Amino acid sequence: MIHGDLPGKTVVAVLFSLAMSLSGNHSSIASDYRLAKGQTIYVPVYSNIFSAPRKIPFNLATLLSVRNTDMSASITIVSADYYDTKGKLVRRYYQQPVTLAPLESTSIYIPEDDTVGGSGANFIVKWASIREVNVPIVESLMIGMKSGQGISFVSPGQEIRSGAR
């Protein structure tokens, strides 16, 4: 017997189960990916953030990144529209749909001095595909440098509607 009234095999089984739950069950990884024919994605963007304690704006450059994660099928970016803090449309970045080949990426750059979006800006990205594909990674990267100080962070997109309606 090992510790208390539990037989040794039971303790080993309990420890094994605990170890598997702590390390994550890797057999479910294959089911973690998602397939879709299209999505509408909300992507938070920050033209600036405020430094404490005086709320001084710290301007940031933004890179919106769209990455086709499917290894065998293309996707089409239907639109990528930029909205300001108040929800007002600022810019439409694609006048025509843009097709991304398997594993291809594209990006939109907003310079540090373009602060029209404000601290609550966002992109609405719509994409579509003829067949179900791995959903793309859509995220924004914010970067800023000032007086020897630098900041960078990523903001992931979130699906707000399935399909690119």
Image (cartoon, helix red, strand yellow):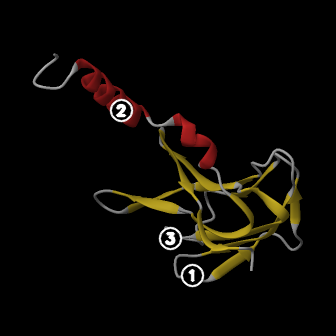
Q: Secondary structure at mark 2?
A: helix
Marks 2/1: CA–CA distance? 48 Å
Q: Nearer the viewer, residue 155 or 102?
A: 102
Identify which residue is drawn at 87% across, 52% down. 73
- Percent position of residue 79, x then y: 78, 72
Residue placed under numbered mark 1 in the picture = 87
Near mark 1 (Cα within 10 A), the count class, few <14, some 14-19 or many ≥20, is: few
Q: Residue at x 24, y 18 (%)?
A: 8
- Of pointers 3 and 1, the one earlier in the residue sequence: 1
Which of pointers 2 and 3 lies earlier in the amino acid sequence?
Answer: 2
Residue tagged 3 = 120
The answer, for residue 64, to whether it is visible in the render is no
Could you say which is closer to the camera, residue 151 or residue 94?
94
- Number of other residues with Cα within 10 Å of mark 3, as a class: few under 14, some 14 to 19, many 20 or more: some
Labels 2 & 1 near each other (Cβ < 8 A): no
The residue under label 2 is: 17
In this picture, is 68 found above or below 18? below
